[in-house]
Amino acid sequence: MSAGPLLDPAPGPRPQSGLGATLAHARYVVSGNPVTALAFGLLLLLVLCAVLGPALAPYDPLASDTAAALNPPSLAHPFGTDQLGRDILSRVVAAARLDLAIAVFSVALVFAVGGLAGLAAGYFGGWTDRVVGRIADTIMAFPLFVLAMGIVAALGNTVTNIVLATAIINVPLYARLARAEAAVRRNAGFVLAARLTGNSEIRILLTGILPNILPLMMVQMSLTMGYAILNAAGLSFIGLGVRPPTPEWGIMVAEGAGFIVSGEWWIALFPGLALMIAVFCFNLIGDGLRDIVDPQRRT
Amino acid sequence: MITRRTALAAGLAAPFVANGRVRAQAPSRNETLLLIQEYGPNSLDMQGIGASQPVNGVALNCYDRLLRFKPVPIPGGGGHQVAMTELEGELAESWQVASDGMSCTFTLREARFHSGRLVTARDVKWSLDRAVSIGGFATTQMNAGSLEKPEQFVALDDRTFRVDFARRDKLTMPNLAVTIPFVFDSELARRNGGDDPWAKEWLKNNVAGSGAFKVESWKPGVETVYVRNDAWASGRRPSLRRVIARDIASPSTRRALIERGDADISYGLPPKDFKDLIDGGKVKVVGVPIPNGVWSLYLNTKVGPFADVRLRQAVAWAVPYEKILQASLFGRGVAMSGGPETPRVAWPQPFPYRPDPARAKALAAAAAPGGFATTLLFDAGNATVAEPMAVLIKEALAPLGIAVEITKVPGSNFRGEIGKKTNPMVLNRFAGWLDYPDYYLFWTLHGNNSIFNIASYQNPELDRLVDAARFTSDPAAYDRSVIDFVSLVEREVPMVPIAQPTHDVAMQKTIGGYQFQPCREPDFRYLTKG
Amino acid sequence: MLRLVADRLITTVPALVGVIVVCFLLTRVLPGDTAAYFAGPTATPQAIEQIRRELGLDRPLPEQFARYVADLARGDLGQSLTTGQPVAADLRARLPASAELTLFGLVLSLIVAIPLGITAAVRQGSMVDHACRIVATTGVSLPVFFTGLLLVTVFYFLLGWAPAPLGRLDTFASPPPELTGFYLVDSLAAGDLETFRAALAQIALPGITLAIFALAPIARITRAAMLAVLASDFIRTARAAGLSGRTVVITYAFRNAMLPVVTTLGMVFSFLLGANVLVEKVFAWPGVGSYAVEALIASDFAPVQGFVLAMAILYIALNLLIDLTYGVIDPRTASAA
């Protein structure tokens, strides 16, 4: 297998810094990097949609109105209406909650499973390392989307299984990342000191090593959030998405895709844009975060 | 210089020259039809187990049957459909039903298989024996016309063949014209079949027929190429010399291809696209309401909430028929609501129900005051039409206190699901090949409990009426039975008919001779180009 | 070197075993009753039970697994219900189409992404850098099927520049004599420029769709690798020695930055194989991806697991190749291994 984590070709120890210094640095990075600032702004908007959701939507996202089906964007329906006359703006807004939830839960799960497994592998070495490594290798041997497809097809297309599949295919990435970082630190001075003062290994792992690799994990988590949304959209396109009539960006794009050729471009375009913006945000934030946690890279 | 290619071509052409035949020029684009469809055949043998719907097209175009349905003009124009009760000879030059009405004797015409051998009565017997013995769909279809045992088929001499009827069944003769009882070159098949007396594996991958077309190449999942059999004796020589049938999974792509003129004819577009193509006027769309076909909501009468007839009626009073027709079928069909109190002798036909929220609510409140949650199942392969349908039904049932969860089930798994007969609500489209009301109900509501009896409906009274209609030869008694069993279904609503869909085909304006067949596959024998 | 290959091969064994186990489990949990499907819509429960016995589906799982492995060893991946053909034959016939498309997309992407990444690194923090980031990130933020459909709509349907998305060649053209199975290569080898042009026209849009998707990871890794190298001492020395900026970037920095880029290619390839599944569906590309999706929709599991297995093996082989290439580029790893 290819060696080393994908996004960090040359991991190395980096200077520790206090919270205040990090915040100051973050301010500096954002001010010097308008693109990241923009991404944070857009993310705020999405989170707002997700939290307020239905309150912001002008119509009931599930209510059909066949008399107003397939209307192009207008004042009454700024994003137009779909095949059943549902308001696309309302559906796009309502979908933010589910899509962000899929992203957040997938990432939380993969972090909990992949991250901790990698941490243990790197810290303890030996058979733990070998078992984790083998499992990661096996998963990595599949083209990721294909594996996700197989898992959802096998377990049934529910939101839970989509989250599960997304988490599983990302496990190796997290495991490797965490393993590399933990392995570097297992014999670091502060770890030896903690061990000498009688701390248990688990305690050292969770309180000593984990916090140190968190920043790097954050970068990866941001990127994975974007990927999770794309993955769900891809699954929807081949008919393995969430159940109708639940609004979800991927399934809306997939449904709307059939209408592009016939000229009803708005059905796919607006959810597509929302999806793109969300993924775009997470990717840019990931990049921006890297600049924050890895100041060396910036010089 | 002789390139490898020209040398190869010369080598290939040699046998034709040796035969003394002059090889005609390769078919031009004008003689080649490009057909696009969602998916193609998974076998070349329609009698074989597991053959998919497009295999009917192979049976239709590459094989002959004793009889075929007579083409009659489609009322709205645009081509022909078939008359169920009028048959014409295909391999049969003439036929005569015995005076006692219990057998029919066929005289074969002088037709030759693609191999060059004469078609004999023995080939017909072998083929029909195969159809009733092979099991699976082919055998069941034969049985539907009381063609049940090899002993019913008798080869009297090389060109005379007799079918003995098991009972008087008006479906026996038309059932000889559907795509199943086609005639194989039995010697060729047996020679290549190895140990298997029915040569199933070999016939799956090879055509051994006498039909108007031969299969030139078959790349499963990609394309099937047909070439005309110039020696075809069972009908007028087709005008197309070559047909390329491409499998294009994406409906958008299929639409773009036909709209831009890159494909000649397209089957299986979403109804929305057919409507747009009609409105656009650039291509010709020919639609036929699918005979004996209807989208229905099946309500399980054995288990779950809909065992209570009041809830079934409540649903029938709640379904937004007209809305569904517009939003899901884009008007390409006939809504099955608001029919007369006394039914006609027809199937499908509108039931007396129409959306009446007050009545629906009253019935639901009486039967299930607290409301309940249930699931609605449909085949993911039909999602384009069934999904909007399901969403509208879900919405319409919410005010009755019925919370519906929609479940899409992929392909073959759908069959498994309906086979369980435990799903409370299922949306499905069933279409019978033979256009008789009793035939339809025999499949979908009869006590024989076939897989298509999704509602798991068991009612001896209905069985009696359906069986009476099937086997009577008295038209008045037949009409009475049909009216009685349709009334019964209207009262009991184990299935709520929603809409009779239109079978649409889009083609360039230069394409003529469209022929609708009950199997709904393209019939290349009549099509013309240019 | 041979020793290295052998060692490396042995390390792939556990992954291979894992893949086979997962594929087997996948076939057993995928919904859809094969026996019921084979028996046809009108079969009796007894008939279904008999077919189940014939297919060995009533045996205990370990026994089924042993059978499965034995079949695999004979190259038997089962029978597809949708095409009616042996899965192995189907995959063989369709693999070149997918491989050609994926490689085409990858090469296209490399051609664009590497200069993009280098430029971004050299002018780090400038508007060019930000623009590169936005372009690459936008590409990866679009669902591939959406990009594909958009390209079809604009370039085929509206503008008419691209040929009909009907697969690898125009309907009335015939494929070049088979050599590699790659139409672009075969037509050139046969000196048939017309077919080459036709094949290129067909592969352009799906290739671009894939390339757009792969742009971001490649550009990102190139930029990062270049930044790391540019910051290193030997580059400073080279600059201090008065070498021109161009020479430093191209000759010294880029060559060293290639290592991580090559390592990432395996990952990107896997990424593209997944994306391929969706792209093939949109462009009616007769590859293994569209084959698997169609089978999946019909719950025809033999092709699905055959496809997953084939892809996994392909991917393992590719990574092996990359690791070996890596050894060639950077002799240090070879000696360390």
Image (tube, coloured by chain):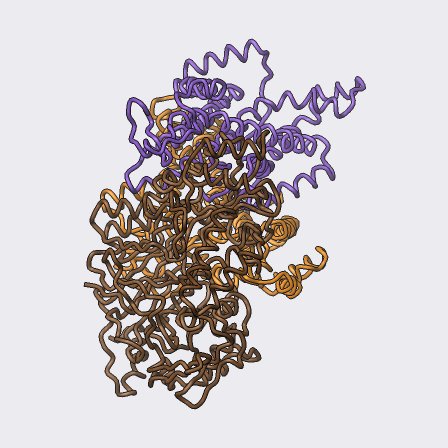
For this rendering, which residue is in front, A166 or C261? A166
Indicate the chain coloured orange by its letter. C
Which residue extends farthest bottom?
Answer: B157
Expressed as whole percent of the image width and height from the top left, the position of residue B469 reads 47, 63
On screen, residue A193 above or below C114: above
Which hue belongs to chain B? brown
Indicate the chain coloured purple by its letter. A
For this rendering, which residue is in front, C204 or B227? B227
Count the marks: how many?
A: 0
Which residue extends farthest right?
Answer: A198
Give left or right: position of B325 versus A211: left
Expressed as whole percent of the image width and height from the top left, the position of residue A129 reads 70, 37
Q: Quadrant of residue B448?
A: bottom right
Expressed as whole percent of the image width and height from the top left, the position of residue B203 reads 47, 73
Residue at 39 percent across and 75 percent down: it is B65
For this rendering, which residue is in front, B272 or C249? B272
Q: Is residue C256 visible?
A: no
Give left or right: position of A98 versus B263: right
Q: In which quadrant will I find the N terminus of chain B? A: bottom left
Expressed as whole percent of the image width and height from the top left, the position of residue B482 reads 44, 58
For this rendering, which residue is in front, C127 or C214? C214
